[in-house]
Amino acid sequence: MARTIFTRDITLQLSHGCIATILLTTVCLLPACGRTEPLAVASGNAGASPEGVVTVTVLSADPKASTLTVKGKGLPVPDKDDTEVLKVGQGDALTGYAGRQIRGELTKSDGAWRLENIWPADPVLVAATVDATHEVGSDLVELGRKAYRDVGDTLPAFALYNQNGEIVRPTSFRGRRLVINFIFTRCTNGNMCPANSQRMVDLQRKVKEAKIDNVTFVTISFDPEHDTPGVLRQYAGDLGMDLANFQLLTGPAAEMKVVLQEFGILVKQENGTLVHSMATLIVSPEGRITYRKEGELWTVNEFFDRLTPPTPEAKS
């Protein structure tokens, strides 16, 4: 079972010699993933991937059975046409991978072959995340000693995967106001990530009830080791997020590292713990940060008031 403890005055080193101190930071002892280790070689198939990692094409998905029908080399018990039905997480079955390439880890649990830790593997998408890592890294150099992007700054030029395994960039949101927060799905401290996610859901509902349009909610994970697009899809469903205007983003570890530095989110993992800060932002339709609240203690009304259009009387 995961445990959470608190610590104060945690100082982390940022790039370019900048130092930041977190006054109240969560240290989360991560739970075991609950899966077996990838098998070195699948029995009965000499062509299996030596490390249990395969790249396959998804032919179809069955969300009710939580399976994907895939085709490719290295499958454990393939049909003559190199296809096989594999168990996957429910979020992975819902993600919409049909007709696309994915990469995942083959495991065997309770006599059934599973594909886990699934990521998009289309070369074009993979190249997009690599290019974005270089671009965001260059942005960090230009920031110099400025620790992170604050009110008045534009969003960094990221290219991350959403809960559907699609590439999302800041330009994808151009013309819409954004509310952005940062979490990781394995967090078990009820006052931190779970509470922040629930407030995002409550804010989304309140905005919808008030018929305020042009707002998109964005949650960025800082745990790429675990939070794949499928995991985020499952997380969204569990919390009742309306994905019509909610995007949950993740990406390769290298890109997440520089993206989080740009946003000023401090994350350090060592000895099974995650130490992290939190922030929630509002971004204008032009892509500029207009409001930034540090820490986990923000309210729905605080952000709702800033998203509510001023009345004619207020304008005058």
Image (cartoon, rainbow, N blue to C red):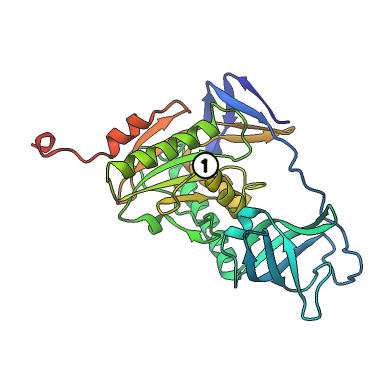
User: Which residue reaches farthest top?
Assistant: 8
| Image-based side of 2 in relation to 37, left or right | left
Can the viewer see residue 304 in this picture?
Answer: yes
Image coordinates for residue 92, horizontal then vertical, percent = 63, 57
Image coordinates for residue 65, horizontal then vertical, percent = 68, 59
Q: Quadrant of the C terminus?
A: top left
Q: What residue is rendered at 45% in x and 25% in y?
A: 297
Compared with residue 69, is residue 168 higher up or lower down, i.e. above or below? above
Image coordinates for residue 181, horizontal then vertical, percent = 46, 39
Can the viewer see residue 289 in this picture?
Answer: no
**Nearer the observer, 315 or 155:** 315
Q: List the residue tagged with mark 1.
A: 239
Compared with residue 56, is residue 66 higher up or lower down, i.e. above or below? above
Name the amino acid, label 1.
Leu
| Image-based side of 36 in relation to 33, left or right | right
Q: Quadrant of the N terminus?
A: top right
Image coordinates for residue 78, horizontal then vertical, percent = 81, 73
Compared with residue 126, is residue 310 higher up or lower down, i.e. above or below? above
User: Which residue reaches farthest front?
Assistant: 64
Q: What residue is rendered at 58% in x and 58% in y?
A: 94
Compared with residue 255, is residue 207 higher up or lower down, i.e. above or below? above
**Nearer the observer, 144 or 301:** 301
Q: What residue is rendered at 47% in x and 28% in y?
A: 295
Q: Quadrant of residue 303?
A: top left
Q: What is the crowding at mark 1: few (fewer than 14 residues within 10 Å), some, or many (at least 20)?
A: few
